[in-house]
């Protein structure tokens, strides 16, 4: 029997850094595009690792880019830390006049900006990371937020993969000592939070549904399909609200 | 280099603002009529934020302070701790300093709902707002919001209660486009930023959802540990609007929210005439 505890820990550790070469290439191209669109000296994407309490810089373009990638910053520090804590984008014209600025981190990259603009990379209510733009000619928070929305596509997928991996590993680990997969998934749900708990609970329900007769399965599928259509409608209305602005 | 405009702020460029109908009063609303001679005396202004450092030279005095914090043993799940407290971040002190500088005799009340990293829970924020409305505040500065739209009914109820209790809620829009509750409700004074040297300048955008704008770009503000920083954000525009409202209420006590909006729109029109 494999050591599933070790596997869960592994998912926790590598989850936030679970990016393929293509992801990094995509984020780097996005940084370059954001840098170009805003006339900035540099742009970077950092990813929040909540367990470690850190922001990890995974992609960057422009001045200091090579040095910043791989750097970790306590998620309570710096302008980026403010963005993580408050969930708010921020534009600072002169970082020397702002005590929040992490001077040492910037200095270590060889490029210390004068102006800094940072916006949260969000998925729903969660902040997944921060997109930072240094010394932009066009310091436009709305424009930067648009690039952050694109970065969120990559970060969200990576986070979901890590979460699913953790849930499955937990369930496999639990199955070694319990009766069925449904029970194992329930156990995984009980030890998880938020989305992963919901996912595990849902998976457990599907396992149970699989044991029912064809009529019951068809009825359950109709109910889920109707709910999904309803939820999609809500999202649609939210989109319409945004466009109307 | 162009101005670092927070979201919603570009609608307030003078050439983009729609004309506002005149009321045909005997004379236009002027600064002199609206706020001339007012210091905000007699007006209670609550700041729902990270706390206020009463000892900061830019603040000088805080007239009341409460912390709203979770309490599993309390009937509503939270408790209200009265008494002096620290600012855990600097953000609330920044807002307080702005209001003090514009409306020097307003009474400032700190309602702390945010923690050390400026994080907070939407329901604690709602509880703080409920406290401010119930405690008889005249103006409440909300340089915070939630993007969790399951809280729309809760804040809808609270903002209506405020509107019908003559409590002016000044609510900063987020700095980037996203759902911001209750800032985008029409009953509050939703605020974005302009670059201005005049702390009394207000602009009016009838198209919303940011209805008002005031000074909020590169503003020197009080911060933690007695320091000062230069900051940009709709968070710092809101206290400018809150302070102007305190001046209006200091001179014209008892106005309702829609009357105050009328006066503010009059001031915006007057500013538009005098601003080149």
Image: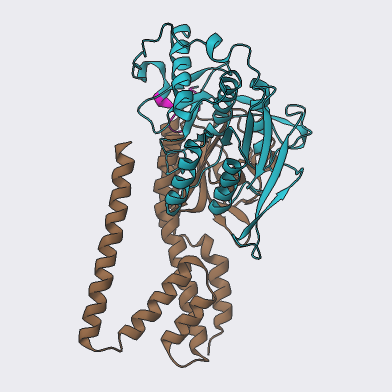
Chain colours: A brown, B cyan
Where is residue B59? Give x, y as percent.
73, 29
Residue B270 in percent (x, y) is at 46, 11
What secondary structure characterizes most of the magenta part? loop
A175 left or right of A214 in image:
right
- In screen coordinates, is A50 left or right of B57? left
Is A228 in front, or is A22? A228
Report the residue at 44% width, 8% height from top: B28
**A113 vs A20: above or below:** above
Which of the 4 image quarters holds residue A103? top right
Span of residues in magenta: B2-11
**Viewer-side residue, A54 vs B260:** B260
**Vertical arrangement, residue B236 with respect to residue A9, above or below:** above
Q: Position of residue A101 (x, y in %)?
A: 66, 38
- Relative to B150, is A230 on the left or the right? left
Q: Is residue B192 visible?
A: yes
- Residue A45 shows in the view: no
Magenta residue check for A37: no
């Amino acid at each position: 029997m494999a050591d599933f505890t070790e596997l869960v820990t592994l998912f926790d550790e590598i989850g936030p850094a679970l990016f393929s070469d293509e992801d990094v290439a995509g984020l780097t191209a996005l940084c370059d595009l954001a840098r170009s669109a805003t006339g900035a000296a540099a742009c970077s994407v950092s990813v929040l690792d909540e367990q470690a309490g850190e922001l990890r810089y995974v992609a960057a373009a422009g001045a200091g880019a090579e040095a910043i990638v791989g750097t970790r910053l306590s998620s309570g520090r710096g302008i980026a830390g403010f963005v993580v804590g408050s969930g708010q984008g921020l534009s600072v014209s002169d970082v020397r006049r702002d005590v929040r600025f992490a001077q040492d981190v910037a200095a270590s990259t060889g490029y210390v900006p004068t102006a800094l603009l940072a916006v949260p990379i969000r998925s729903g209510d969660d902040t997944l990371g921060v997109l930072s733009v240094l010394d932009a000619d066009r310091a436009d928070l709305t424009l930067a937020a648009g690039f952050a929305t694109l970065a969120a596509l990559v970060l969200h997928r990576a986070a979901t993969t890590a979460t699913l991996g953790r849930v499955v590993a937990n369930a496999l680990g639990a199955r070694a000592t319990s009766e069925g997969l449904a029970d194992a998934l329930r156990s995984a749900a009980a030890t998880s939070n938020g989305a992963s708990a919901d996912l595990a609970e849902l998976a457990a329900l599907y396992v149970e549904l699989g044991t029912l007769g064809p009529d019951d399965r068809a009825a359950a599928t109709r109910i889920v399909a109707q709910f999904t259509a309803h939820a999609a409608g809500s999202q649609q209305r939210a989109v319409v609200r945004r466009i109307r602005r | 280099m162009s101005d670092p405009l927070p979201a919603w702020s570009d609608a307030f460029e003078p050439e983009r603002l729609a004309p506002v109908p005149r009321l045909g009063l005997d004379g236009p609303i002027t600064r002199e009529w609206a706020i001339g001679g007012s210091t905000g005396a007699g007006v209670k202004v609550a700041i729902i934020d990270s706390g206020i450092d009463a000892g900061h030279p830019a603040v000088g005095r805080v007239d009341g302070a409460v912390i709203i914090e979770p309490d599993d043993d309390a009937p509503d799940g939270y408790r209200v701790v009265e008494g002096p407290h620290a600012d855990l971040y600097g953000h609330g002190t920044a807002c307080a300093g702005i209001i003090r500088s514009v409306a020097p005799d307003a009474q400032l009340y700190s309602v702390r709902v945010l923690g050390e990293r400026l994080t907070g829970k939407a329901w604690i924020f709602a509880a703080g707002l409920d406290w401010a409305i119930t405690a008889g505040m005249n103006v409440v500065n909300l340089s915070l919001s939630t993007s969790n739209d399951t809280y729309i009914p809760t804040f809808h109820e609270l903002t209506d209660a405020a509107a019908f209790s003559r409590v002016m809620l000044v609510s900063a829009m987020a700095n980037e486009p996203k759902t911001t509750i209750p800032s985008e409700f029409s009953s509050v004074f939703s605020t974005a930023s302009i670059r201005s040297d005049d702390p009394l300048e207000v602009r009016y955008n009838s198209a919303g959802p940011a209805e008002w704008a005031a000074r909020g770009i590169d503003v020197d503000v009080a911060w933690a540990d007695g320091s000062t920083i230069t900051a940009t954000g709709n968070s710092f525009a809101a206290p400018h609007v809150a302070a102007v409202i305190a001046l209006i209420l200091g001179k014209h006590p008892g106005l309702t929210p829609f009357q105050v909006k009328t006066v503010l729109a009059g001031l915006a029109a007057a500013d538009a005439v005098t601003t080149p």
